[in-house]
Amino acid sequence: MDFGTLLPLSGEGPKEHAALPGESSSILGVQASTTTVATSTNDEPRVPRKASDRCGCGCGRTPQKGIILRQGKRWYVRNTGGWLAVVLFLSALGLCQSDAAQTPSPSVTDADGGSAGQSNPAPGATAGRADDQSTGRISGTIAVQNGALATGATVRLTRDGQPPVEVVSGDNGEFFFFNQPPGPFQLTVTANGFESKQFSGTLRAESSFVVPEIVLEVARATTEVNVSMTVEEVAQQQLEYQLQQRVLGFIPNFYASYTPDAAPLNSRQKFQLAWRSVTDPITIVGVGFLAGIYQAGDQYAGYGQGAEGYAKRLGATYGDVFIGTFIDSALLPSLFKQDPRYFYRGTGSTKSRFLYAISNAVMCRSDNKKYEPNYSAILGSFATSAISYTYYPASDRSASLLVESALIRIAEGSVAGLFQEFVVKKLTPHLKKDPPPQQ
């Protein structure tokens, strides 16, 4: 529609137009009758025009058919044309807003599966950008106990079958992981001076997982104190353990060490071990039993028979045990810095263990844990035999008996070593319960 055809020229008010023949024009209630006007400007006669052929506004123009409008209709078109343009403009604006409102926004899922707001990632707190529509985003905030946001905390993302990814929380404590495939994941948050925190979740496809606020706790101050025992203290503990060793649960087995690297004994501990050995009730009972065997075989006949003879044999036998134990197991070992104990090997071939056991009488371990000739046992055996020479009957005193007695004592050390290596440990119940202290 051409509005220039319908609207009046500028500055013109509404004018009346002639009504059609046979009609009356009514404008604001004023009736106008149809008139016929004839004009002639030349000498030639002109056919008079009908009033219906002229414009009713007095302009003398012949109105065109189809555009003769009543004054009320022209006024309506002129006033409603502007409103129509406004309506069209507002409609176009409404369509733009409708398209913008219908634009889908990415869904955000929190740890409980609900929706959560979005925030812009901080610089340095992101990892990857989502290009694949099936991937998602993981984000969250890190704070500390006092409510402040944690800046610079390291967030490590681990997933099955994928290399770990790390980001650092930004100034606002936020972190982001973009372009992450759906599935389970685990976050580990660490920061200097704070205890690490972990969080596990499952990321859905085409969504964002908002991790609940992770609050870091201040790391507890720990002081590591290494309490080391002295060699003497370790040796004392091992000695106390040895004093509980008893064959079949009642026979003393104090001079055997089943600790591979036992601490050496000092002089006081060597004498302590000797004293506990000779004063043990089972030791005294054993000496009494041995004295009875000597009397029954009428050995040391010079002592005679009866109670007096038994008492002399008991005293002489106990004197050998007491003196021999203190000389070759306490006094001389302290002087020569040697260890009087038998150190159980338990490994190697049977032959090597056999040779090791029988050499116990002439070889021993020194306090520096090196093996050397057993001066304590060898010299102690002769010293004990020489001392016993003073209280045995005169009929049993001779140089040959002294040497014989000393050699017997040395041989007893070899036999004792064989029993310790192959038999005694199996018959000592205490060893099966508690291991000996280690150095």
Image (cartoon, grey):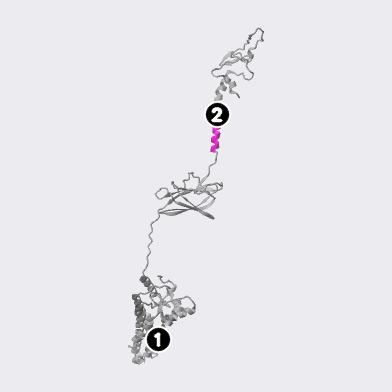
Q: Are marks 1 and 2 in contact (CB under 8 Å)?
A: no
Q: Main secondary structure of the magenta part?
A: helix
Label 2 sits on a secondary structure element that is: helix
Q: Which residue is farthest left?
A: 390
> Disc number at residue 87?
2
Between 152 and 136, the one lying in front of the other is 152
Discs 1/2, front: 1
Chain part drawn in magenta? 91-101
The relative height of residue 219 versus residue 234 in the rendered view (above or below) is above
The quadrant the C terminus occupies is bottom left
> Disc number at residue 227?
none
Q: Mark 2 is on which residue type?
A: Val
Q: Mark 1 is on which residue type?
A: Leu
Q: Is residue 187 magenta?
A: no
Q: Position of residue 410 (x, y in %)?
A: 40, 84
Relative placement, left or right, of 28 versus 352 is right
* Residue 100 is at least partly visible in this image: yes
The alpha-carbon separation of the residues under discs 1 and 2 comes to 133 Å
Identify the residue under disc 1: 407
